[in-house]
Amino acid sequence: MIPYADRKPDTQYRDLLQFILDHGEVTETQQETDAITFIAPPSLHFNLNNGFPLITERDISSFWKQAIGEIFCFVNGGRTLSTLEKFGCKWWSPWATEAKCSKRGLMTGDLGPGSYGPAFHDFPMVDGGTFNQWQHIVEQITEYPHLRTHFVSPWIPQYVGRGKGKAQKVVVAPCHGWVHVRVINGKLILHMFQRSADVTVGDPANIAQYAALLMALAHVLGLKAHQLVVSFSDAHIYVNQVDAVKKMLSREPRRFPTVTMDTSVTNLFDFRKEHFVLGDDYHPHPAIKEIPVAI
């Protein structure tokens, strides 16, 4: 990362919020709160030379590490509240209640076999075995770095679909995690696609966790962590979040901070949230408390 003083304030996140407000349509949702929705807004491109993409429109230092704990829990195959909490992520309990789990034939606290962890780490194979997608990515990039097929999917269709004769086996259909990794001239680029993005609340965490994953993956592979690209299909702002969004848009852009990583860790599956440290150059605007979260 270049020195803090040489970094340029990044406006991409606020530009996305404004774009959805300007061009989105109000739609009904299953969360019973209408959302302003736009399909496939412009992608975000974060060059890590310009700092770690931790948004500055509001202070998120109180929870950014939970997002990192979450992604490494999923990379390791975690699918329960207790496992997530061991990795330092404590925000899943509203989605894994007794009512929500029993409705899907799951034990309380179980996100289900269609959730991120099983898809990433234990994707079902036709012979009854499982396939570790992230282990495969490390191995394939090591052997064939030039390929365009370094791809991971969080979607196990038979556990996600709904309708007559179908039994959904996941408390929340995966919203993010379609990942395409490319090696270009010794630099690693991670492109993450989101099916559904709560841009106000969820997306800042998603950006941070995949930036951390990019740093870890690049280190394990001996490559430079270059760029995180985030693309969206259904990008939305819930109507009860608009006041908070307008407050963020009224604030001037600021520079991204520095995040350092413990380089003594050499196995992708050994990384934890504690291995990432936020520098003292994070200068966000004040936090905005109690932004509504759709459940």
Image (tube, grey):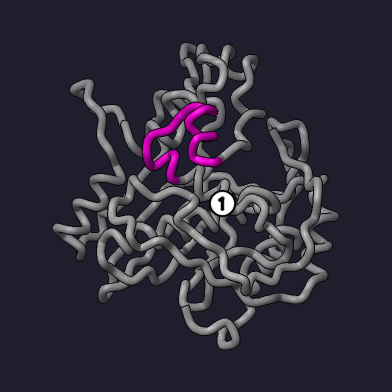
Q: Is residue 56 shown above or below 205?
A: below
Residue 257 spot, x, y in % from top left: 59, 71
Query: In this view, which residue lies farthest toward the left?
Result: 143
Res. 239 in view: no
Q: Quadrant of the C terminus?
A: top right
Q: Residue at x 40, y 24 (%)?
A: 158
Using the image as rendered, state which of residue 71 and residue 11 is in the foreground.
71
- Residue at 65% x, 53% y is 199
Find residue 262 and report its horizontal and vertical position in percent: 40, 61
Say which quarter of the image contains residue 4: bottom right
Residue at (42% x, 59% y) in the render: 191
Q: Residue furthest bottom?
A: 6
The spot of residue 11 in percent (x, y) is 65, 73
**Would you say residue 109 sits in the magenta stretch?**
no
| Residue drawn at (14%, 58%) of the image | 143
Work out whether 264 lies above or below 12. above
In the rendered image, which residue does mark 1 sit on?
A: 65
Q: How many marks?
A: 1
Q: Amino acid at mark 1?
A: Lys
> In the rendered view, does 11 fall on the left or right side of 209?
right
Would you identify the image quadrant in which residue 154 lies? Answer: top left
* Residue 231 seen in render: yes
What crowding class fits label 1: few (fewer than 14 Cα within 10 Å), some (14-19), or many (20 or more)?
Answer: many
Q: Which residues are magenta?
A: 72-88
Give the image location of residue 52, x and y in percent.
53, 68
Q: Considering only vertical position in the picture, is 107 above or below 179? A: above
User: Is residue 118 rendered to the left or right of residue 287?
Assistant: left
- Give the secondary structure at mark 1: helix
Which residue occupies the extreme front position in the image? 264
Residue in front for this viewpoint, 91 or 105: 91
Depth check: 93 or 133 in front? 93
